[in-house]
Structures are given as structure tokens and as C-alpha cells.
Image (cartoon, rainbow, N blue to C red):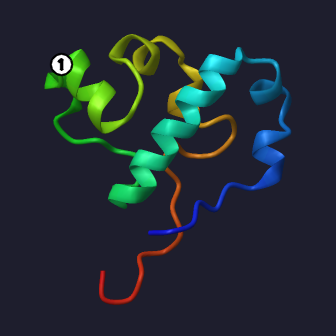
Amino acid sequence: MEWLNIHTSTLDSEAFMCSEPVDQATWLKLQRYCIGQENGGVIRGAKGWTDRQWQHLVRATLRKCSANPGFGMGWGRPAGEILPRRQGA
């Protein structure tokens, strides 16, 4: 996948705008990982990942990814929301 389809209202929402910049960046990194994997926002086996695996695969620490409950809600959108699967994917 080459494009992230994130609606501007998500980035302009009060919840996103009032969060810390590092939390915004972590959320975007999680979105990017989930969209790239086309996993619908569910990272299977992630509970067993080490901090190093989180840093390498998602580009964010385990602590930051698990610290913010806003990630699960995706600031008004499902985490890892993706476009319908590509034809032939």
C-alpha cells in the first residue's frame, strides 16, 4: 500500500489536537503499520513482542504504544482503519 487515507477531521479532532505530539506521532506510526499490513488494526501476536520488536516493526516503543487508551479508539475511527482490500491482495 502506498497511500494512507486519514480523514482530515481525524487530525483536526479535539482529542487528537489536545494530545501530546509524541502520542500523535505514535498513533500515526501504528496507523501506518496496520495499514501496511492490511490487518484491520489487529496486530496478532503483539502481546509477545519485545520492546525492540515494537521499535523495529512499528517504529515506536512498547511503552508508548500501550500507554494511551486513545490508540484503541483511533480518535473517533477504528485503529488501523484501511481501505477495502486491493484486488488480488
Residue 7's place in the image compared with 65, above or below, is: below
Label 1: which secondary element: loop
Residue 11 % position (x, y)? 78, 41
Quadrant containing the N terminus in the rendered view: bottom left
* In-image side of 8 versus 78 (left or right): right
Q: Quadrant of residue 42?
A: top left
> Type of residue at label 1?
Thr
Q: Mark 1 points at which residue?
A: 50
Residue 59 % position (x, y)? 39, 31
Quadrant containing the C terminus in the rendered view: bottom left
Residue 11's place in the image compared with 40, above or below, is: above
**Residue at the spot x=57%, y=66% of the render?**
3
Residue 37 % position (x, y)? 33, 57
**Residue at the spot x=18%, y=19% of the render?**
50
68, 51: nearer the viewer:
51
Neighbourhood count class around disc 1 (C-alpha, 10 Å): few under 14, some 14–19, many 20 upward: few
